[in-house]
Image: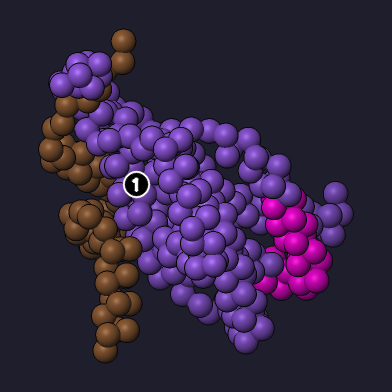
Chain colours: A purple, B brown
Amino acid sequence: MTATSALFLSVFLACTVEAVEALTVVLAVGVTRGWRSSGLGVLAGLAALAVLVAVLGPALTVVPLQAVRVVVGALLLVFGLQWLRKAVLRAAGRKALHDESALFAAQAEAARSQATSSSSTVDVYAFTLCFKAVLLEGLEVVFIVLTFGANAGRIGLAAIGASAAVVVVALAGLVVRGPLSRVPENQLKFVVGVLLTSFGMFWSGEGAGVVWPGADAALPVLVVFTACVAVGYTLVLGARTPRVDAAARVGS
Amino acid sequence: MRALRVVLDVVRDLVIGDDWRMVAGIAAMLLVITGGRAAGLPVWWLPPVTVLVMLGVGVCSAPPVLRRHRR
C-alpha cells in the first residue's frame, strides 16, 4: 500500500466514523421531530463549521475539543435521559401513548389552518440537537484532516478523503431515511432515547477525562448497556403497573 | 428585557426540561469524574452507573396510573 492510499484510507475511515455518529443523531431526531428543523440544524452546523474553518484555518487545532465534548455530551445526555424516561414510562403504561393516527390528523389539520404561519416555526429542540451533532463531529473531521494531512504534508488529499467519507455517509442516510420513517413513533423514540443517552455518556465522559476501555469500540457497548437498562426498567415498571380492561374503561 | 426572559425560558425548558434531577445528576457525575481523574482513579464506569441511577430515579418516581389492557 502506498503512502498516498494509506493516508486516504486512514482519513476516509476515521471521518466515516465521525460522520456516522452525526448522521445517527440527525436521522433519529429528523424521523421523530421532523426534517425541516433538523435540516436547518444541519445547515446551521455546517455554516458555523465553515465560518470556523475560514476564520481560524489550521489554528483550529487549538480549539479545546475536550471542553466542546463535555458541553455537547452533557446536553445530549440530559436530552437523552429525559427522552428515555418518557419512553420507558409510555412503554410501561405509566404515561399515555400518543395516538399516532389522531396526532397526525390533528397536526395535519393544524398545518392546514396555519399554512402561512407554520413555515416560520422552528422546533428548537430538533434544531439544537442536529446543530450540535454536526458542529462537534464536523470539528472532529476537520481535526482529522489537519492532523493527518499536516503530518503527511498533504492536507489536500486528506480533505478529499474526508469529503468522500461525508458524501458516502450522507448518501447512506438518504437511503435509510425512508424505511426509518415507517417505524412506529413510540418505538422509535425509545431507540432515539437510547442513542442520545449513549452518545451523551460517551462524549461527556471523554471530554471530562474518561479513558474508555477499547476507545471508540466502547460506544456500541454503551448503546447495548443503555438499551438493556431501559428495557429492564420497562419490564419492572410494567409488571408493577395495575392493568385495567380497556373495554371496561370505555364503558365506565 | 422581555426578549432575554423569553430566551432564558427557552434555554431552561430545553436544558432542564421537566425533571431537574437529571441535570443535577449529570453535573455531579462530571464533578466526580474530574475529581477521580485528578486522583488517578479509573472513572470509566461512572457514566453508565449514573445513567442506571438517574433513569431509575426518573421512572420510579413517576406516579402510577392504570393502563389499558387490550384483549
Q: Position of residue A76 (x, y in %)?
A: 39, 56
Toward the bottom, the furthest residue is B1
**Chief SS of the magenta region:** helix
Q: Position of residue A112 (x, y in %)?
A: 52, 55
Report the quarter where the C terminus of chain A lies.
top left
Does residue A70 sit above or below A99 in this rendering?
Answer: below
Task: Tell which of A240 and A23 is nearer to you.
Answer: A240
Does the magenta run of residues contain A156?
yes
Asked if residue A66 shows in the view, the reply is: no
Toward the front, the furthest residue is A113
The structure residue drawn at horizontal position 63% and vertical position 43%, both measured from the top left corner, is A177
Neighbourhood count class around disc 1 (C-alpha, 10 Å): few under 14, some 14–19, many 20 upward: many
Does the magenta run of residues contain A241?
no
Total numbered labels? 1
Q: Is residue A166 left or right of residue A134?
A: right
**Disc 1 designates what residue?**
A83
- Chain ID of residue with mark 1: A
Q: Secondary structure at mark 1?
A: helix
Asked if residue A32 shows in the view, the reply is: yes
Give the magenta range: A146-170
Does residue A122 sit above or below B42 in this rendering?
Answer: below
Q: Is residue A213 left or right of residue B70?
A: right
The structure residue drawn at horizontal position 43% and vertical position 33%, both measured from the top left corner, is A187
The structure residue drawn at horizontal position 38% and vertical position 35%, both measured from the top left corner, is A99
